[in-house]
Image (cartoon, grey):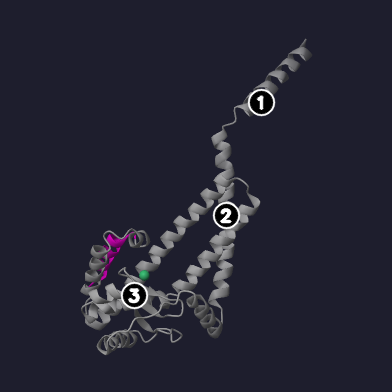
């Protein structure tokens, strides 16, 4: 009798467990899989990010310069002819910044050109060359305003943003490729890659803030104030009001204007 009782109790326990198995929360399971995947992704990304960082940071100066030239080559644009007066003005501003920052890396090419383009924008290339688009150059009426744009771009070179950008791209690409190979669930791959795009965007915003800080610092040193920085940002905001492409790559103009205001003496 007692034996029978035990057998029944055991059956009841087994049944209860079976019920538990079938009632397992599918959302909980998905959460476990996703968090496991997230941890692995973060580990792979961090490892590649650190390793590529060590490689890029310890590159000999000549090798780094070669890499910078290589990365610049494919983006090179043809400069337009500018007047001798404008050329002098650009050189004058550049020299003011170099006098204010004696630590600026000598590896920088620092050729500053004006290019034909419909947008108001400026770019720093991996080798330190800077392009300013013609419509933006025309808007920069004073030396102070031109200083803000040139110093901002020089800030990107000084902070090695181009190499750090390469490092993020290497890490992103390697991680996404790895998971595309080992994971056939396309939904999870999409989640993984979109997560990286978001993290890259926030890194880039940080780069922009640091380049703004550098420019403001230079302007405070040269002119004793950085009011022109706010004016330039307001011009960029106003003139690019309907430029979806510009706005998508510069999503936080208002926040940057606010930060510049705080940094201005
Ligand atoms: Zn920038």
Which segment is the magenta one?
251-265
* Residue 220 x %, y %: 25, 78
- Disc tally is 3
**What residue is pinned by disc 2?**
41
**What residue is pinned by disc 1?**
17
**What residue is pinned by disc 3?**
116
Query: Which residue is painted at 49% across and 53% down in the image?
Result: 195
Q: CA distance from mark 2 to mark 3?
A: 42 Å
Q: Is residue 182 left or right of residue 236?
A: right
Among the two numbered marks 3 and 1 on one chain, the one whose residue lies closer to the N terminus: 1
* Residue 15 x %, y %: 68, 21
User: Looking at the image, can residue 35 be seen?
Assistant: no
Residue 207, image quadrant = bottom left
Depth check: give the residue in front, 9 or 37.
37
Query: Which residue is painted at 46% across and 60% down in the image?
Result: 200
Evaluate if marks 2 and 3 touch, with contact meaning CB atoms under 8 Å apart: no
**Element marked by disc 2:** helix
Instruction: State whether residue 71 is above or below residue 236.
Output: below
Evaluate if marks 1 and 2 touch, with contact meaning CB atoms under 8 Å apart: no
Few, some or many residues within 10 Å of mark 2 (<14, 14–19, 20+): some
User: Looking at the image, can residue 25 be seen?
Assistant: yes
Q: Is residue 224 left or right of residue 151?
A: left
- Where's ligand 1: which quadrant? bottom left
Few, some or many residues within 10 Å of mark 1 (<14, 14–19, 20+): few
Depth check: give the residue in front, 224 or 254.
254
């Amino acid at each position: 009798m007692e034996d029978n009782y035990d057998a029944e109790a055991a059956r009841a326990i087994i049944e209860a467990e079976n019920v538990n198995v079938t009632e397992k929360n599918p959302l909980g399971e998905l959460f476990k899989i996703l968090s496991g995947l997230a941890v692995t992704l973060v580990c792979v990304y961090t490892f590649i990010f650190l390793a590529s960082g060590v490689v890029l940071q310890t590159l000999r100066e000549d090798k780094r310069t070669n890499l910078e030239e290589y990365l610049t080559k494919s983006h090179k644009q043809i400069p337009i002819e500018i007047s001798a007066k404008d050329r002098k003005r650009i050189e004058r501003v550049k020299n003011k910044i170099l006098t204010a920052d004696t630590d600026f890396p000598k590896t920088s090419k620092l050729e500053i050109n004006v290019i034909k383009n419909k947008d108001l924008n400026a770019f720093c290339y991996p080798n330190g060359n800077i392009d300013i688009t013609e419509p933006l150059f025309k808007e920069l009426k004073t030396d102070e305003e031109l200083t803000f744009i040139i110093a901002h771009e020089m800030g990107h070179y000084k902070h090695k943003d181009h190499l750090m950008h390469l490092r993020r791209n290497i890490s992103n690409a390697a991680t996404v490729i790895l998971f595309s190979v080992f994971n056939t669930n396309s939904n999870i791959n999409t989640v993984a890659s979109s997560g990286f795009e978001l993290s890259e965007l926030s890194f880039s915003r940080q780069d922009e803030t640091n380049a703004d800080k550098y420019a403001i610092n230079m302007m405070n040193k040269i002119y004793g104030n950085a009011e022109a920085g706010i004016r330039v940002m307001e011009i960029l905001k106003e003139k690019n009001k309907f430029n979806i492409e510009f706005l998508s790559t510069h999503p936080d103009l208002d926040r940057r204007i606010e930060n510049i205001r705080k940094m201005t003496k």
